[in-house]
Image (cartoon, rainbow, N blue to C red):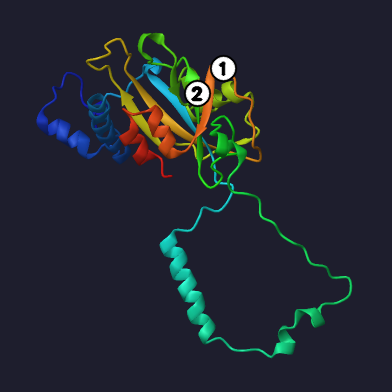
Amino acid sequence: MLKNRPKGETLNSTTVSTSLRYSHPRSIMRRSLTSLVLPLVAKRGFSTNSENIVASVLFERLPVVIPKIDPVVYAFQEFSFRWRQQYRRRYPDEFLDKSNSRGKGDYQIDYVPAPRITEADKTNDRKSLQRALDRRLYLLLYGNAYGAPDGKPVWHFPEKIYESEETLRKCAESALKSVLGDLSHTYFVGNAPMGHMVVQPTDKVQDIPSCKRFFFKSQVIATNKFKIGKCADFVWVTKEELMEYFPEQAEYLNKMIIS
């Protein structure tokens, strides 16, 4: 071993190779992992500047009613039902006579379904959650946002600059809480972001600071009304309507958002 070598003895290649041969396997493995990890960290360039990281929240309301069936699917289901009716077993009429088999005290309820088209749909009230009941709705805010050109108000998702939070998920929760007041009617889907976008200055706008924007998904739970604050305006929009507010990022958002 190197520590037991005589005083004044010089090291040569044979001595070093012999000492490594008798070294503990864990120390060799630790040195190997260190030599592999450090170049990767330097090569990938992990940023430690928290001012360039922004957590955004894709806050969605799930469909309230079942979406309409596609005409092709409906035609197939109708054909399948009529086909099965031709070969079904016929039961006696007295067996199917509900009026005679109904016991005393029974009553019939006339079920009237709620309308699929609401007043908010007719007036195109995008501030209401009572619209597009068969679609997903997403919350957009109008006001000051990180990276907006000339500091002008723009449409954006609820967001917050990552500062001293334990995780990016905590940062996203703080962003949504600052808008809603509390998170009692929200549910964050997972701890990891659903996507991220790198914002760089363009030729048209040079004063935009570069940043990495991470998107987290959260859903509305057990309510149909929120008191939205800290913004000049807000809307609840479908996926197609959302693309109108972000024409430059429409391609990316179309891939990130399922429906």
- CA separation in Å, label 1 and label 2: 9 Å
Q: Residue at (20%, 24%) from the top-left corner?
A: 6
The answer to whether 85 appears left or right of 75 in the picture is right
Whether label 1 touches label 2, CB < 8 Å: yes
Q: Identify the residue shown where x is 43% and y is 31%.
A: 215
Look at label 1 and name its amino acid.
Lys
Q: Can the viewer see residue 133?
A: yes
Between residues 161 and 256, which one lies in front from this camera angle?
A: 256
| Residue in the picture at 66% in, 55% down | 113
Instruction: For mark 1, give the secondary structure.
Output: loop
Task: Give residue 107's quadrant in the image.
Answer: bottom right
Question: The N terminus is located in which quarter?
Answer: top left
Q: Is 65 on the left or on the right of 197, as rendered?
A: right
Mark 2, Cα crowd under 10 Å, few <14 / some 14-19 / many 20+, is many
Q: Identify residue for label 1.
A: 230
**Disc 2 residue type?**
Leu
Identify the image quadrant of residue 51: top left
Q: Is residue 42 above or below residue 130?
A: above
Sequence-earlier tag: 1 or 2: 2
Query: Which residue was labeled with disc 2?
Result: 141
Quadrant of the rendering where the C terminus is positioned: top left
Frontmost residue, 30 versus 16: 30
Residue 28 horizontal/vertical position (percent):
27, 36
